[in-house]
Amino acid sequence: MYQIEKLTKTYTQGKRTVHALRDVSLRIEDGELVSIQGPTGGGKSTLLQALGGLDRPTSGSVVLDGKDLTTMNDAGLTRVRAETVGFVFQNFNLIPTLTAQENVETALVPAGVAQADRARRAVAALQSVGLGERADHLPDELSGGQQQRVAIARALVKNPTVLLADEPTGNLDEETRDELIDLLESLWKEQGLTLIMVTHDSAVASRTPRRLHIAKGTLKDRS
C-alpha cells in the first residue's frame, strides 16, 4: 500500500520556480489499477518517479508498505527498485546490442541472481508476455509493440508487487495500444499487482477502475 502525504516538488528553471507537485496526498491500496492523466508539465511523471524512488521530493512523504522512500538512503532505494517496484517507460529503454532475453536478464543482475536462474526466469517472463519464441531477437528485429512487451517482461521478471508505467503506449498505434493494455490488465489480475499508469490517452485511462488527474502540480481523484 502507498500512503503519500503533502508531497511537494519544486525546482528552478532559469529565474523561475517551478512547482511540479503541490501538497499531493494520496492513498493507493494493494492490488489497485490506477491511471494518472494531465497536461504536459502538469506533474504526472514527477509523481510517478517519486512513487518509484527515482526522484526525491522537496518535502512530504511516500510510504510504501510501511517504508518511507523519501527518507531512505540510496542503497535502500536501490533495493526497493530491484525487488519491489518494476518500471515500464514510453521509449522501451532496451539495450540495442542485447537480445530480448538478455535485456530481461539485466533486471536480475542487481539482485545477484545466478546466471542459470536469470536465464530461466527471463524465458518464463518473455513467455508470459507472448514472446517466448523471440527470446534470441535483438530489439531492432522486433516491432514497437514487441519491444514494449520485452520491457514489460523485464519489469516483471523481478516478481515485483508494484508496476509503474510511464506512457507505456505513447509510441504505439491504436491497435497495438489496445493489445498492450489487454496484456497489462491480464498481468495485473493474474499477478495481483498494484499497477499505476501515467497516460495522456483517455482511451487508456477509461479502462482503469480509478482515474487521477494532475495539473499544475495539484491532484484530483476522478474515479
Image (cartoon, rainbow, N blue to C red):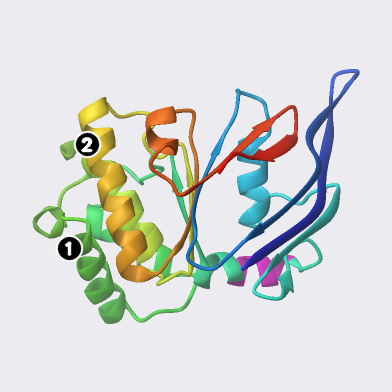
Q: Earlier in the sequence, mark 2 or mark 1?
A: 1
**Rendered residue at 37%/63% (across/down):** 156
**Rendered residue at 60%/72% (across/down):** 79
Residue 186 rendering spot, x and y as whole percentages: 28, 58
Position of residue 205 in the picture relative to residue 80 (left or right): left
Residue 106 rendering spot, x and y as whole percentages: 39, 62
Q: Which of 191 and 55 is in front in this view?
A: 191
Name which quarter of the figure residue 223 lies in: top right
Q: Tell me if residue 211 comes above or below residue 102 in the rendering.
A: above
Q: Which mark is residue 127?
A: 1
**Could you tell me which secondary element the residue under label 2 belongs to?**
helix
Tag 1: residue type?
Gln
Q: Residue 140 carries which label?
A: 2
Residue 82 rendering spot, x and y as whole percentages: 52, 68
Q: Which of 165 and 158 is in front in this view?
A: 165
Density class for disc 1 (Cα within 10 Å; few <14, some 14-19, many ≥20) is some
Q: Tell me if residue 112 comes above or below residue 190 in the rendering.
A: below
Which residue appears farthest toward the front when viewing the image? 223
Q: How much space separates mark 2 and mark 1, taking CA atoms?
A: 19 Å
Density class for disc 2 (Cα within 10 Å; few <14, some 14-19, many ≥20) is few
Tag 2: residue type?
Asp
Name which quarter of the figure residue 171 lies in: top left
